[in-house]
Amino acid sequence: MVLATNLGFPRIGANRELKKAVEAYWKGKSSHEELAKTAQDLRARHWKLQKDAGLDHIPSNDFSMYDQVLDMICTLGLVPKRYNWDGGDIGIDTYFAMARGNDDAPAMEMTKWFDTNYHFMVPEMEDGTQPKLSSTKIFDEFEEAKALGITTRPVLIGPCTLPFLAKHKGENIDHMKLWNDIISVYEEILQKLEATGAEWVQIDEPMLALDLGDMAREGFKQCYERLSKAAPGIKILLTTYFGDLRENMETVFSLPVAGVHLDLSNRAPHQYKDAIAMVPEGMTLSLGLVDGRNIWKNNIHQSVEIAEFVESHIGKDNIMIAPSCSLLHTPVDLNNEDALDPEIKNWMAYATQKLGEIAIVAKGAREGRDAIASEIEASDAVQEERRTSKRIHNDDVKKRVSAITDDMKKRKSPFSERQKLQRAALSLPPFPTTSIGSFPQTQEIRKARSAFKKGEIDEAAYKTAMEKEIQSVVKYQEDIGMDVLVHGEPERNDMVEYFGEQLDGFTFSKNGWVQSYGSRCVKPPIIFGDVSRPKPMTVEWSKFAQAQTDKVMKGMLTGPITILQWSFVRDDQPRSDTSRQISLAIRDEVADLETAGIKIIQIDEAAIREGLPLRKGDWDAYLKNAVEDFRITSCCVEDTTQIHTHMCYSEFNDMISSIGDMDADVISIETSRSHMELLEAFVEYKYPNEIGPGVYDIHSPRVPDTDEMVALLETAAKVIDPGQLWVNPDCGLKTRGWAEVEPALKNMVEAARIMREKAASAAA
Ligand code: GLN
Ligand code: ZN
């Protein structure tokens, strides 16, 4: 029989109950018992929800107080030494110390979960790390569900993916032994689950969607041989997601597992065709047809067709219908949205609605299309509406995109010419100082913005409050002697949301929260239609700021890839089409800023790197497109207008030629923490344009002193022509307080002054 299944449900709760409970516990406002009770209630609610939706396989152990990888780290007893764990029960406080650090030990590192915006805790392997089963969470939650009458399918992060994600910190680690010991713990887990009555276990191995070598593939074989023998009574569903298996598929289907899950979302829509040719008889295929990373309704018709096609090859007994990946990456319940435009809302589905879709597709696959005729009809109607809706489709936008010419992607003159013209036009000193855009977002700023949003103050009052703030940061920057000023971005809540709110084609939810890390949730903008800019977005603020000073005021924009990357994106056209439309919208803003007399315009592309595809083979196409987007956005200006860009990271080695191709006049990057080592890529590539390697780590409250920044600049000046260098912090200052920013920037300006002096005396 075709089964309706799920891979994981968001745990934060429809009203972010888990966030609130965890934070109350951290603040000492509630007890561990209260926190445990909230967690248990959430689990029960979510299991019941899935049961009521008609799901046959419901996951457990997908719940987590903080992060499912951290849970797995604890289950395997991989607690780093610095937390002084005694080897017994890992209490909640040790658990949170690993996540957040405590007085004695810093937190474990956190990084992005594949190409999602979810952050996981990075496992650490040290000398002496000895895996052993150290948590009963997985068994407890299985029993907890069983007591509610639900036999769940426990979820584990796989024994290949988990060590693959780990950071190796020791010098004397016997990697083979360590890995073998890890597998032994998994064997023990499977045996215990078998004994408690689990029929299936879901083992997540998303690394199978990456480029792997033969060794890794061989490792999978050995590992799963062992697991299959350890607990022959339990069925393993090997789950892959976030992309297609490509050359790893053969290995996957040769493993001794009972089932394999495939991502069939638009990231890998066709891989079922290869799969049916390879899947051994009797093996279950779990079809990830409902997109777990988006908020759009499923195309039921198409899903059922695929399910039927697979059925016709492997029969009905061995099919599961599933989301493409865990629903963790989608908001909880669309019914919580009361302010969305009804037309757009009718196109959407959050996790709760996706459960219903899974059940419907499974029913259709099981009983035939007639059994779900009305659902197919409704789904077809939605698809048709989206194909034709005037809300989505804007002919002017489409025409403009198709009329993009090569000239629009090119500055008038090459950089060497522009540099001369800009030097004459801007008359900046050597080692010019600037900041990345935002200044501290004080209580007052936030209060004014939220009062304006709630209608408590009118637009004029809001504008006055922001202008006062702009005047004060302009004065501050003049006083300390910065060269290129910024207006401080007080009017922006978020660098993407601010633009999304003013662009056509975007909408915003009230409750579309998705877990980003721990208790932190984000509410991504939703791009539903063709994007265009009805009117200027930043020009008035920049003009006002420029009017306050004789110095050069830098205009601040967010780039197309970053806007795309941090939003829910429409699934009815390629991502690159959407970013192209955004490029044109931002291009208009660039042109208007220039017309308004703004001589330097910064286009932040904070997220280009994190948008890199998981497979190296897909990088070129992505980067080519990202470069073109940037050029379309920025190339409309005169040679004298200086284009800056900013990127919030420092690993450029593998994409430096694309950074070069973007041809920004100036790029600022994060480098202070790595002591300029990360300039290496720029040096090797002989990056010709100007560059501002951050000299001040804004992620830390520490105020760097002048000498330290001079030392960093001298390091940089050794490898990069000093004439190319700018002086700036690593990133925007909005998360810092004035008490730190004030002295830090003063020191930074002084560091630039010292560098100029040194250069002058060296020349004399
Ligand atoms: N201009 C933005 C700011 O300063 C850039 C933020 C970012 O790079 N994340 O806040
Ligand atoms: Zn940044």
Image: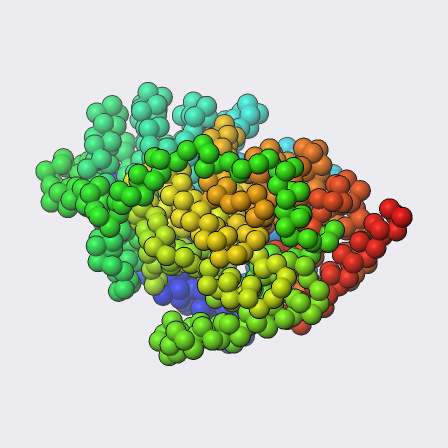
In depth, the one of 465 and 201 nearer the eye is 465
**Residue 141 appears in view:** no
How many discs appear?
0
Q: Is residue 395 visible?
A: yes
As rendered, which of 416 and 605 lies closer to the eye?
Answer: 416
Whether residue 27 is situated above or below residue 733 in the rendered picture: below
Q: Nearer the viewer, residue 111 or 165?
A: 111
Q: For the point 48% across and 53% down, which residue is it? A: 595
Residue shown at the point (55%, 25%) measured from the top left: 213
Which quadrant of the rendered structure holds the N terminus?
top left
Identity of the residue drawn at 37% across and 57% down: 535
**Residue 685: x %, y % from top left:** 67, 33
Image colouring: rainbow
Q: Is residue 212 left or right of residue 142?
A: right
Q: Position of residue 641 (x, y in %)?
A: 57, 48
Q: Position of residue 31 (x, y in %)?
A: 50, 73
Question: In this rendering, is residue 129 above or below 283?
Answer: below
Q: Would residue 620 appear left or right of 510 to someone viewing this image?
A: right
Residue in view at x 71 percent, y 36 percent: 683
Residue lying at the far top in this picture: please name it: 277
Between residues 610 and 466, which one lies in front from this camera angle?
466
Q: Residue 591, image x and y in percent?
A: 46, 49
Residue 252 is left or right of residue 701, and the answer is left
